[in-house]
Image (cartoon, rainbow, N blue to C red):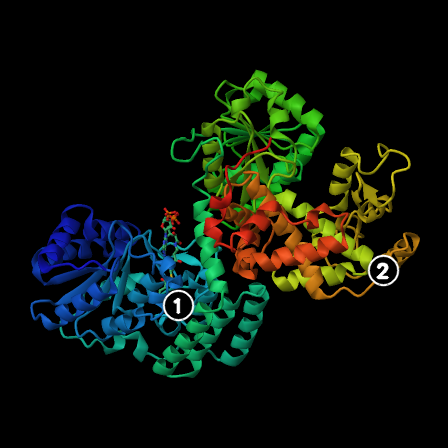
Amino acid sequence: MSIHTHTHIYKLASKLHVQSGYTVIFFKYLICKNTIYTFIVPFLISMLILCQPHLLLVSVEIFLQALEDGLKRADADPSVKAVMICGENGKFSAGADIKGFSSPKRRGIALGPIVSLIERSEKPVVAAIEGVALGGGLEVALGCHYRIAHVKARMGLPEVTIGLLPGAEGTQRLPRLVGVPAALDMITTGKVLCLVIPPKGVKICSLPDVDALFCNSIFLPPGQPLGPRRLSLKPVPKLPNMEAFLSEALVKVKKQAHGCLAPELCFQAVKAATEQPFADGVRREQELFNVLLTSGQAQALQYAFFAERAVQKWTTPSGASWKSASPQPIHKAAVIGLGTMGRGIVTSLVKAKIPVVALEQDLEYLNMGRKAVMFLLEREAMKMEQGAQTLDFHNPARLQFTVDFDVLRDVDLVIEAVFENMALKKEIFHKLSRICKPGAFLCTNTSALNINEIASATSRPQQVIGTHFFSPAHVMKLLEIIYGHHTSPTTIATAMQLAKVLKKVGVVVGNCFGFAGNRMMFPYAQQAVFLLEEGSRPEAVDQVIEDFGFRIGPFRMSDLAGLDVGWRSRKGQGLTGPSLPPGTPARQRHGHRYSPLPDLLCENGRFGQKTGKGWYQYEKAGGRTAKPDPWLHSFLSQYRDTHRIKTRFIDQEEILERCLFSLINEGFDILAEGIASGPEHLDVIYINGYGWPKHRGGPMFYASTVGLSRILAKLQKYSEAHPDVPGLQPSAFLKKLVAMGNPPLKEWMSYLSRPNNKL
Ligand SMILES: CCC/C=C/C(=O)SCCNC(=O)CCNC(=O)[C@H](O)C(C)(C)COP(=O)([O-])OP(=O)([O-])OC[C@H]1O[C@@H](n2cnc3c(N)ncnc32)[C@H](O)[C@@H]1OP(=O)([O-])[O-]
């Protein structure tokens, strides 16, 4: 809180009035509430003018101490009639400084008592909320006697998303204000609500009617007792079936938490509000807050918060960076190929209100693609307030379907999303570089192919970039952005800006087979299959990975994505299929261990969910409920017999370590090669694209919590047992970090002499 002298405060008040001011803010609000418009505006102006010397404005932005001092001064000063708490620069408050939670000095949380102090004030305290009121900021508002909100105010208690709970008495006051169901929803999910005009069809909790609060605060008759306005004195509104409601809510919270502690502890705190008097509830809230603060999960989630922001500040080994590169505006885009990925990408662009041309090779594919895109868009529109009109996707100026490449002449950016076939992609890029206007950017949606080779087919390799979307592309948040040898900084900046506009997290990485995400996935998936050869079952491996917190284990994932995808890629690489040289040992390729199990499943027509059979069996083709399959179990036994593999019991620890440590090991190689410019990049990729549990901070953060020496020792042990598996041989960079005494994650990159992108 900034310490405002009275003079400064009064200056602030007049600035507020003269410039944009609360008159204007209320005016905006009143436009949609015109029934009270004429009455209030003149009143408000007069209040600001007449009461200026008596109106104390306190910023909640900076220091708690200032807020405390200000409140005490206001209470003691007989000339002050009311206190208004507002934020600076159009924002009420984004809450506490998250960095402070990991500082030992910050362990004693002082906000709760200040919120109580606000509430106890003998003079009416009004929170004037503009912009965001989040976390501690909203808790301050809950301590006030009145809350008035700007039309665009956004409020929420996002503590749960950083592994905490609203620990400044918010879990006790909010249920008293909005009732238990709405409070639980807000506190256990951390959702941020736009209060004044809630989007239709979106379930939001209704904070008390802003209208009524507004009128009350303005027409508050002098001397009216403040008791009824103090939330801590109110009972929690009763529900006829509170017990049943709470036990149902707990089941839901646990199911969605996937091992994350904070939502359940948030639930416990709110439950305490329903069972105990306010003061006891506050004590329970504090206990639970301290459990979370010291749980390790909070640290991981807070790391993830900053990592997501750090990756926006991209750099490349050649010195290009976000600081010096400016994105170009994208007024119109095109998508080539309307398969699964193309459909999602078109939907994403339409949702972001970028006019799109969608192109297919012939009318049959175009019509199929059009139907699928329209279906997705209708569904998206249903989720939005006035969605169909807003998206306007029936308007050909917004979304045009064509088979004619010439229509792409005026687009600013093209995203090619055809099959993973280099020859086809090169042919398309060659065509694009002839047809598209000179400034147009050419993006390829590929999960592994060489960007340089694709760019070589064009006359403008500086404008070619990889944009690796994740399926479903209109849902998944990650966009892996891959620069080639010649990609210009402007092209990278434009792709990053596109990610932002599409509400995705863009992560810039270098060019290598599989880029960062899939390259780390290969050894993980390989270990999972090796474990089956050695005696495990798909359901056992999946269980361990899901217990760790992944949404879905490797075999369920493979069934969902389709085993044929990897099969096609392995055939392309000559690892299986007709191009495999005769006499190649069944379980070896290029002198390394290889498992033909996934190929054999495909040869048996088991492509996963789409065929109703894969690593599991499903109720029908396209079914989603995976059931262990006795056929697969006996197939595995026969396979082991055929190849004389001695089976053994493999415990959970080995399953977890072999899958995860090999993935992490690859991450260290990627860092050493300069493919990713920091561990945060790999963590953001894994959290947003591969279902890595956020409360474990991403693979590299997790490695830092396990301890690099332990990871190294385990990799050494497993690579001794499996010397023919390169993925288990410890990375030189990991060894170096251990030799340097296991430095903290943020120092890792300083131990690399000079990052160097190999390609
Ligand atoms: C006992 C309980 C007491 C209270 C507990 C709490 O309040 S818990 C807290 C509950 N509150 C939350 O969880 C709110 C978390 N914050 C948000 O949700 C969003 O940042 C936003 C909606 C406020 C603004 O979104 P936007 O897209 O406009 O902007 P942006 O997201 O890019 O951020 C801009 C810069 O600000 C930085 N920064 C932001 N907030 C914080 C913070 N609290 N702390 C520190 N830093 C923060 C951010 O790192 C970035 O820094 P950079 O990279 O430029 O150096």
Q: Please tell me the numbered disc located at residue 633.
A: 2
The image quadrant of residue 58 is bottom left
Quadrant of the rendering where the N terminus is positioned? bottom left
Mark 2 and mark 1: Cα distance apart in space: 49 Å
Specify whether residue 419 is in view: yes
Horizontal side of residue 583 vs 592, given as left or right: right
SS class of the residue under badge 1?
Answer: loop
The image quadrant of residue 641 is bottom right
Horizontal side of residue 678 vs 173, given as left or right: right
Specify whether residue 220 is in view: no
Circle 1: residue type: Pro
Q: What residue sits right under mark 1 in the picture? A: 166
The residue positioned 21% from the left and 49% from the top of the image is 24
Ligand 1's quadrant: bottom left
Q: How many marks?
A: 2
Residue 241 screen position, x and y as percent: 51, 79
Between 19 and 462, the one lying in front of the other is: 462
